[in-house]
């Protein structure tokens, strides 16, 4: 799930930017990109937990430690319903991350690009 969420955030970032990344600033923790983008980290954590709630482990005997997943499948028929093994969580995590990153990071990206000028 974190990979799907990360992909959604990255796609939103690439589509929002008008200027290329400043490679030197990417490696400067005090630079315009900073060392950590807490908005993106928060989006990834939340979208990953939502996504994990919409998938189930198909190999219960091999990965019993993963049986906690699927906690949001109740309205869709539960962990044994028709949608249980559809991996909806991957799509939801990707789409949720994309939309939220597009909305919440737009201003930050514009400020980063303004600092380049």
Image: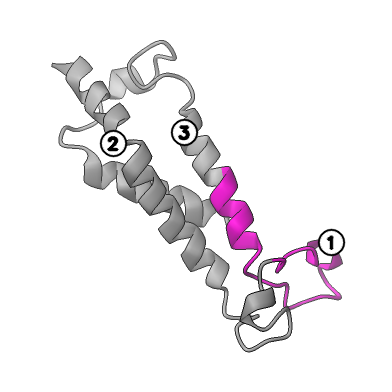
Give residue 37's position: percent from left, percent from top.
Answer: 46, 28
Q: Is 13 part of what is drawn in magenta? A: no
State which mark lies toward you, 3 or 1: 3
Q: Considering the numbered disc 1 on the image, is that residue within a helix, a strand or a loop?
A: helix
Give residue 33's position: percent from left, percent from top.
Answer: 36, 22
Whole-Å distance between the Cαs marked 2 and 1? 38 Å
Give residue 35's position: percent from left, percent from top.
Answer: 47, 20
Q: What residue sits right under mark 2 in the picture?
A: 106
Specify the farthest residue to the bottom: 82
- The 10 Å Cα crowd at callout 2, few under 14, some 14 to 19, many 20 or more, is some
Q: Tell me whether circle 2 and circle 1 mark residues in contact (CB < 8 Å).
A: no
Q: Nearer the viewer, residue 71 or 65?
A: 71
Residue stretch rendered in magenta on the structure: 45-71
Whole-Å distance between the Cαs marked 3 and 1? 29 Å
Q: Considering the numbered disc 2 on the image, is that residue within a helix, a strand or a loop?
A: helix
Q: What residue sits right under mark 1 in the picture?
A: 65
Q: Residue at x 84, y 61 (%)?
A: 65
Q: Quadrant of residue 85?
A: bottom right
Q: Considering the numbered disc 3 on the image, is that residue within a helix, a strand or a loop?
A: helix
Above or below for 13 versus 34: below
Above or below for 66 versus 31: below
Specify the farthest residue to the top: 30
Q: Residue at x 62, y 89 (%)?
A: 82
First in sequence: mark 2 or mark 1?
1
Q: What residue sits right under mark 3 in the picture?
A: 39
Q: Which residue is drawn at 41% across and 10% down?
A: 30
């Amino acid at each position: 799930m974190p990979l799907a969420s990360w992909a959604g955030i990255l796609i939103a970032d690439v589509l929002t930017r008008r200027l290329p990344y400043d490679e030197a600033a990417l490696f400067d923790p005090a630079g315009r990109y900073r060392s950590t983008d807490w908005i993106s980290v928060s989006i990834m954590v939340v979208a990953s937990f939502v996504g994990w709630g919409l998938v189930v482990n198909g190999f219960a005997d091999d990965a019993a430690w993963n049986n906690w997943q699927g906690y949001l499948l109740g309205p869709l028929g539960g962990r044994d319903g028709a949608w249980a093994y559809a991996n909806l969580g991957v799509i939801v995590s990707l789409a949720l991350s994309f939309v939220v990153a597009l909305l919440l990071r737009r201003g930050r990206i514009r400020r980063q690009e303004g600092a380049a000028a």
